[in-house]
Each structure stands twice: as structure tokens, then as C-alpha cells.
Amino acid sequence: KTITTGAPKTHIADSLIRTTLTGWITAGTVPPWDANTLYFIYMDKGVKVTMGGSSSCTSFCGYHDAMSGKKYYAVMPFPSCAGCLGGLSVQDALTGTSSHELCEAITDPVPPTGWYDNANGEIGDICAWKFKTIAGYNVQLEWSNKAKSCI
Ligand SMILES: [Zn+2]
């Protein structure tokens, strides 16, 4: 779903993303919440996302988190900087980062209370920038304790 009302033009803070998402859920703008819902929010090109003291492209290429009441969400800035493209096309970078955050939102839905390693972070962080193609899409490898490797 594309929501353009009030869309940020240059930057947006995570706190405003949370407030906005809460409003969308309440208004029925997005599908209703349940415990298995993960809201992915994709930003327009050129919109910088800030969270705490860090910002997209400088510190992160995407992230997932939880609001109170287990309302899970992931934020995907448009990959337009070298650090988040990593030499990939925009689409491959977007699906790569999206798959990274999707898997982590499942294994560590409320960071860092799930699968979280103090040295290596979440399962996607261990395997960052390692990819494979599934059904024509670039997806990131994720850590497997069973295989003891990125699969
Ligand atoms: Zn990660």
C-alpha cells in the first residue's frame, strides 16, 4: 500500500514513524494488528531516517523494532547511498535488507530479548552482505545455529 499523506520529504525520526504507524493502525489505514503482524515501512528516495543519535546510510540501512503491545515494525530507507547499495542494484539492495530485517523480526521480535548475541548481534548481522537468489530475488543469508554457518 502506498500512503502519501504527510509523507516526509527530507527526513523523519523513528519517534514520528511510531506515532504515525499507531495512527494508521487506529484509523484502519493499514491492515489490523495481530501478534503475527509485522509492518514494513518503505521510505521515498532522499528521505533520511534518524533513530536516537544515528541515521540511515551513516549507521544503518534498515531496522526492525517493536512498539508497546508487540506491535512490530521495520523501517526501510530507500537505498541510495553507496553504504547501503554495497555495489548492488537498488532492487537487490532493498530485497537484501528487507530479508535481513524480516528474519530478525521473527527471531528477535523485541530487540534484544530474543536471539541476540552480545558479540555478533542478530542472525542477519552475522551474515551481513552475504546473499543468495530465491525465486529471482536477492535475499540475505541468515545465521543457523544448527548448521553453524550462514545459510
Ligand atoms: Zn540486523
Image: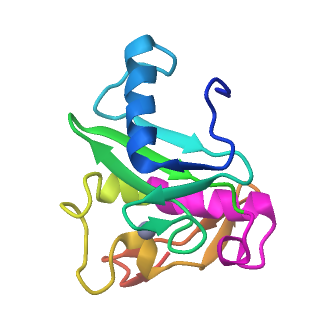
Magenta part of the protein: which range? 80-102
Percent of width and height locating residue 104? 39, 60
| Residue nearest the viewer, comparing 38 with 4 | 4
Q: Residue at x 32, y 76 (%)?
A: 121
Percent of width and height locating residue 91? 77, 57
| Residue nearest the viewer, comparing 76 with 127 | 76
Residue 61 sits above or below residue 17 on the image: below
Indicate how the structure is coloured in the image. Answer: rainbow
> How many numbered marks does the figure carry?
0
Q: Residue at x 37, y 27 (%)?
A: 22
Residue 110 sits above or below residue 149 on the image: above
Q: Is residue 99 left or right of residue 5?
A: left
Percent of width and height locating residue 119? 27, 87
Check if residue 91 falls in the magenta segment: yes
Q: Residue at x 68, y 27 (%)?
A: 4
Split into quadrants, the picture shows ligand 1 in the one at bottom left
